[in-house]
Image (cartoon, rainbow, N blue to C red):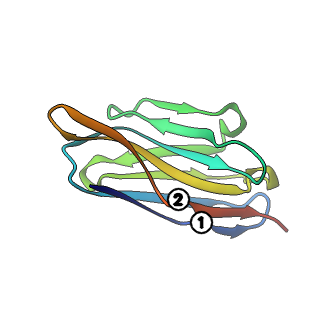
Amino acid sequence: QVQLVESGGGLVQPGGSLRLSCAASGSIFSINTMGWYRQAPGKQRELVAAITSGSSTNYADSVKGRFTISRDNAKNTVYLQMNSLKPEDTAVYYCNANVRTGILRQSDYWGQGTQVTVSS
């Protein structure tokens, strides 16, 4: 089994910054793509940013130039640096990882979510 544990959410004023972290642990053979999703009240969950094992990145248009995703493969950890935060960034942020747990076995795993609130 694989666990993803997120940290770093909270309340921040517009224009402020937060850094989210997500650490994977358990029966991990290797980790492919890792990513961050978010879900605001009444809206569908959406991709915010993703990073492959080779560090190629992909961002939602709404966060390009403000958010940066990175990963530390030695620590099985993915980060999301969020700058110039806006009220519309308010959501529960979820970590996702595509994990290989065996030679022929891989699955998607999710963290429990961390609340990010941008408000004055």
Q: Which residue is mark 2?
A: 20
Q: Residue at x 50, y 61 (%)?
A: 112
Real-space Cα distance between discs 1 and 2?
6 Å
Q: Closer to the camera, 99 or 11?
A: 99
Instruction: Check the picture and name the quadrant holding the N terminus.
Output: bottom left
- Tell me the element at label 2: strand
**Looking at the image, is 70 positioned above or below residue 105?**
below
Is residue 108 rendered to the left or right of residue 80? left
Q: Could you say which is closer to the camera, residue 74 or residue 43?
A: 43
**Disc 1 designates what residue?**
9
State the image quarter where residue 104 is shown: top left
* In this rendering, position of residue 95 left or right of residue 9: left
Q: Amino acid at mark 1?
A: Gly
How packed mark 1 is, by other alpha carbons closer than 10 Å (few <14, some 14-19, many 20 or more), is: some
> Where 60 falls versus 27 (above or below)?
above
Which residue lies at the image location 67% right of the left edge and 40% below the top edge?
Answer: 63
- For badge 2, the amino acid type reads Leu
Q: Can you tell which quarter of the image residue 17 is in?
A: bottom right
**Residue at x 61% of width, y 45% of height:** 67
